[in-house]
Image (cartoon, rainbow, N blue to C red):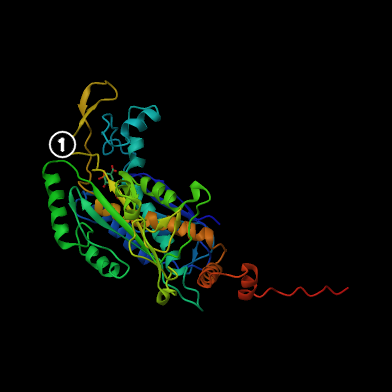
């Protein structure tokens, strides 16, 4: 069954909804984890006043019984405390579109000069619902390798702020270091696991605020514990990298996405780009099956599939388009020049975007794993996962059919009694 999600809701409407379909039955739902991710998304230096009003908590409306999924769609609701969309005084029409926002294109699309309806849905408030969906899918990632008789390594995602404006952190993230870095990230006001870079990033955000402008940056996400072979090379729509790119580009204010070395690989020779393949017998039990790469320029994906190395995705976020200083624009009613509208907003939402990207990337990973390891219940999926890993570790299989029956003895068909 396909793992999918749908969100609904406006920034100043009554609330947001996320509906996740295709989760197996029997999966433990860690609501504390989901809510911790929602709280993290609300934080970070540079956020505006809205986050002092909201307390994002996911309320599960369906699909869960006694803390476990039952196979039906899981609907989650996040209430908007600042709900006032129908109050014309507090939420007036907007006639001067903000350059960089959905205002102009959306108002023309819906044949109105009021940008309000479009901007309410275009608002990045909606990312709260995507974080809830992604964090729910991460419960599956953490349990998929957990077959009772052969427990494996849980699949974990780790996102952080790489840069704000030109203030870049050189921090190196590895399979060994990421858990420690996660604590450093959580102690950082910009969600960057590098104290010195955090101070520089904080300063550039502060400066942007003083100058009544906004600032963007780059966020990075790593996914650990992935086996090779998830995703597909057979159809461009099923490639893991194309799905992740679509999911990441679908996040508000994201203008670019890259994997591993990314755009830099275009300026290098082949031998300087491709990651040499080695084999380490002592690591056969790892999710990578013992295949080792001295570099990870591919970012963990080759041919649209995981290759056993950690997935590394980066996304570039533009500065938020609501500027206190305004930008040249026109009044859509009169067509006369007028500065763009200002509404309370964030100066920088790069830290929040690192949480969003971490969760939307994780959802796509869960989606391809769900496709490879089918079944209606978690135990079936865990069993398939363990079986696949067992086969892969035994490669080369002499005759896959015989090997398969070896692992799974066929049920004998007794001749029917007359
Ligand atoms: C946003 C404008 C601001 C942000 C909002 C995204 O909202 P408001 O106008 O109510 O202050 O705070 O983001 C969120 C509310 C959120 O939870 O992330 C926009 O126009 O995109």
Q: Residue at x 56, y 62 (%)?
A: 374
Q: Residue at x 50, y 54 (%)?
A: 232
User: x, y (%) of residue 150?
Assistant: 49, 77
Q: Mark 1 = which residue?
A: 325
The quadrant in which residue 133 appears is: bottom left
The outermost residue toward the right is 418
Quadrant for the C terminus, please. bottom right
How many tags in the picture?
1
User: x, y (%) of residue 106?
Assistant: 36, 33
* Residue toward you, 191 or 32: 191
> In the rendered view, does 164 fall on the left or right side of 101?
left
* Residue toward you, 152 or 258: 258
* Residue 200 visible in the snapshot: yes
User: x, y (%) of residue 399?
Assistant: 63, 69
Q: Where 214 falls versus 375 (above or below)?
A: above
Q: Where 52 falls versus 103 (above or below)?
A: below
The quadrant in which residue 198 appears is: bottom left
Q: Residues within 10 Å of mark 1 (few under 14, many from 20)?
A: few
* Residue toward you, 62 or 134: 134
Q: Where 356 falls versus 386 (above or below)?
A: above
Q: Residue at x 56, y 57 (%)?
A: 1
Q: Residue at x 29, y 59 (%)?
A: 39
* Residue 125 visible in the snapshot: no
* Residue toward you, 412 or 397: 397
Beta carbon of the mark 1 residue lies under 8 A of ligand 1: no
SS class, disc 1? loop
The outermost residue toward the bottom is 149
User: x, y (%) of residue 82?
Assistant: 29, 48
């Amino acid at each position: 069954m396909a793992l999918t999600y749908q969100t609904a809701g406006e920034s100043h409407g009554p609330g947001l909804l996320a509906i996740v379909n295709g989760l197996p039955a029997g999966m433990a739902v860690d609501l504390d984890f989901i809510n911790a991710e929602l709280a993290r998304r609300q934080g970070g230096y540079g956020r505006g006043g809205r986050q002092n009003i909201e307390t994002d908590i996911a309320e599960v409306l369906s699909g869960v019984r006694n803390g476990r999924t039952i196979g039906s769609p899981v609907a989650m609701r996040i209430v908007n405390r600042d709900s006032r969309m129908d109050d014309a005084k507090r939420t007036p029409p907007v006639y001067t579109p903000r350059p960089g926002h959905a205002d102009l294109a959306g108002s023309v699309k819906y044949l109105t000069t009021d940008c309000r309806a479009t901007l309410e849905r275009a608002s990045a408030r909606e990312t709260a619902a995507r974080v809830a969906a992604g964090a729910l899918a991460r419960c599956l990632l953490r349990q998929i390798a957990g077959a009772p008789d052969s427990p494996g390594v849980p699949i974990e995602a780790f996102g952080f702020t790489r840069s704000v404006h030109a203030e870049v952190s050189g921090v190196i993230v590895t399979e060994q270091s990421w858990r420690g870095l996660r604590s450093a990230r959580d102690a950082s006001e910009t969600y960057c696991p590098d104290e010195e870079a955090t101070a520089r990033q904080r300063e550039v955000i502060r400066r942007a605020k003083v100058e009544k402008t906004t600032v963007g940056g780059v966020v990075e996400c790593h996914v650990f514990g992935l086996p090779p072979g998830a995703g597909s090379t057979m159809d461009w729509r099923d490639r893991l990298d194309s799905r992740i790119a679509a999911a990441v580009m679908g996040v508000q204010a994201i203008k670019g996405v890259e994997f591993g070395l990314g755009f830099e690989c275009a300026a290098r020779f082949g031998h300087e780009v491709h990651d040499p393949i080695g084999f380490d017998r002592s690591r056969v039990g790892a999710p990578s099956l013992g295949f080792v790469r001295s570099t990870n320029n591919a970012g963990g994906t080759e041919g649209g599939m995981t290759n056993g190395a950690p997935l590394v995705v980066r996304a570039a976020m533009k500065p938020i388009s609501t500027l206190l200083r305004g930008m040249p624009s026109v009044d859509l009613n009169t067509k006369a020049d007028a500065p763009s509208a200002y509404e309370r907003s964030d100066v920088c939402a790069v830290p929040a975007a690192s949480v969003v990207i971490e969760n939307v990337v994780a959802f796509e990973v869960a989606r391809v794993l769900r496709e490879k390891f089918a079944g209606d219940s978690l135990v079936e999926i865990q069993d398939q996962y363990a079986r696949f890993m067992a086969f892969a570790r035994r490669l080369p299989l002499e005759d896959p059919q015989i090997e398969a029956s070896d692992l799974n003895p066929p049920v004998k068909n007794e001749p029917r009694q007359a």
